[in-house]
Amino acid sequence: MARNYIPRRDGDFNSWQNNFVSYVITNATALGITPAEVTELQNAQTSWNSSFPASITAKNASKGANELKDEDRDTFESIARLLTRKVQARKETTDTQREGMGITVPDMDPTALSEDVVLNTTPPMIHIDHSKPRMAFVHFGANPQNEKENAKPNGIKGARIWFHMGGLPTGGARWEFLADDTNSPYNHIINNTIGTTVAYRAQWFDNRLRLGPLGDPITVAISP
């Protein structure tokens, strides 16, 4: 089973997104995706299809073109991941549809791993890229500052991410659930109009969604 269905290399991503959009447009009704969501996805693709060739033409000489390309890719990935989570959550979704979209096909291997695996695995560390306004890229894993060397431990399916607006919870406040994600990083979009501090922490889960211990928290300042 592919652990990260969105390719990291821009060239591979470009081929993947073309197939993803084409499949979603052709099968939107069967996938439960609305016309408005299709339009949003197409708009994101249009932006990417403009900035990606510009980046290639510039051959990295133009920092602005590459930055725009990266921003458009981030936007497209956010929309694609939201639609993928919606499709994956539908009981009607088939593995054929998942394969057609190029997304993760659930592992139906009945082999059960011991609960001790997730309990005894060191919790994920977190690194936050908050260089863009109102956005936090939550990198999680054993080596979150280097995604090329940040593979998940054996027996681990993903991480459950928690957050708290305003910094570490105090006075009886509790952590809020953010997401279950199988691929680092997770893009947390924050609609803040003023600067704010956000705290994050995470824990692993296995293929049966059994949770491991929580990792150490981290706090970052998010600009508006």
Image: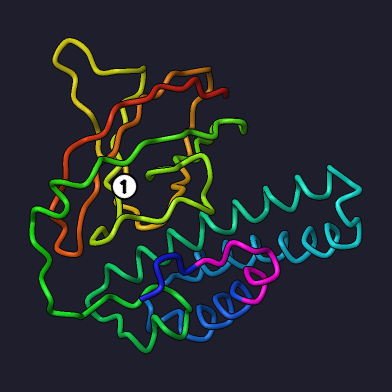
Most foreground residue, 84 or 157: 157
Residue found at the very far bottom of the displayed protein: 96
Most foreground residue, 197 or 143: 143
Task: Please state if 138 lies on the left or on the right of 201 as rendered.
Answer: right
Residue 47 x/y as whole percent: 72, 59
Residue for badge 1: 179
In magenta segment, residue 11: yes
User: Could you tell me which residue is drawn at 32 percent across and 41 percent down?
Assistant: 124
Residue found at the very far top of the displayed protein: 171
Can the viewer see residue 32 in this picture?
no
Can the viewer see residue 163 in this picture?
yes
Residue 1 vs 168, above or below: the answer is below
Task: Please state if 25 lies on the left or on the right of 115 as rendered.
Answer: right
Task: Please state if 18 lies on the left or on the right of 99 as rendered.
Answer: right
User: Could you tell me which residue is drawn at 50 percent across and 64 percent down?
Assistant: 37
The residue segment tinted magenta is: 6-15
Most foreground residue, 202 or 83: 202
Residue 57 x/y as whole percent: 91, 62
Residue 84 x/y as whole percent: 41, 67
User: Could you tell me which residue is drawn at 9 percent across and 53 percent down?
Assistant: 116
Most foreground residue, 196 or 105: 105
Residue 186 x/y as whole percent: 44, 47
User: Could you tell me which residue is drawn at 51 percent across and 50 percent down?
Assistant: 147
In magenta segment, residue 215: no
Quadrant of residue 140 within the rendered picture: top left
